[in-house]
Amino acid sequence: VDYVEANGKTYQQIALEIHEKPEVSNYEFFASKRLADQIKSVGFEVEMPAAGHRTGFAASYKSGKPGPVMVFLAEYDALPGLAQEPVSRHCPKEGPGHGCGHNLLGTACAGAAVALKERMEREQISGTVRVYGCPAEEIVIGKIRMNEQGVFDELSAAVTWHPFDRNRVSYD
């Protein structure tokens, strides 16, 4: 049984918890701590706060042998006025919400990073896996400030995803 199959319900629960406690940019205290705590619980070293963001974190797993540095970019901020019941139809409610699905985005990136770590351990693959908790994505400052702090300087590749109405690779 792979990590995703064995732990999918845990990450589904985390996504729902973050959905139920939406926090706007730079105030993502619950979401960032919840994700950082989960990643730490499975063997990542976690720095929090990170890169000048009080709600940012930097998590790292090193195989012990030099290799590529793979980074997953977890976002978790909500938008004002977009609260929605966790159902597949339009069912708005008052307050901020995850209209863009960042509760899913951040949680899936964290889960994917842990799954990669587990595979690297099992197959003795060299390299480093990092998860960067990227706050304030909705106001377009999180990753900019992180870049100014040099957190992207050593990476080999960065991966993120975003809910959308079709599958595509984006170079935005």
Image (cartoon, grey):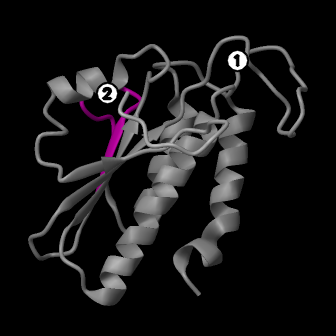
Amino acid type at image mark 1: Pro
Residue 87 visible: yes
Frontmost residue, 169 versus 136: 169
Residue closer to the observer: 32 or 131: 131
User: Bounds of the magenta span?
Assistant: 48-60
- The residue at which mark 1 appears reads as 96
In the rendered image, residue 84 lying in the magenta stretch gets the answer: no
Q: Please identify the quarter of the rendering in which residue 84 is found.
A: top right
- Measure the alpha-carbon separation of dots 2 and 1: 22 Å
Please provide percent x and percent y for residue 139. 45, 13
Q: Which residue is mark 2?
A: 143
Report the residue at 54% width, 38% height from top.
Answer: 162
User: In the structure shown, which secondary structural element does the residue marked by tag 1 occupy?
Assistant: loop
Q: Residue at x 70, y 17 (%)?
A: 96
Where 88 sits versus 144, above or below?
below
- Can residue 34 be seen from the camera position used here? no
Residue at position x 85%, y 32% in the image: 85
Instruction: Using the image, determine if residue 65 lies above or below residue 87.
Output: below
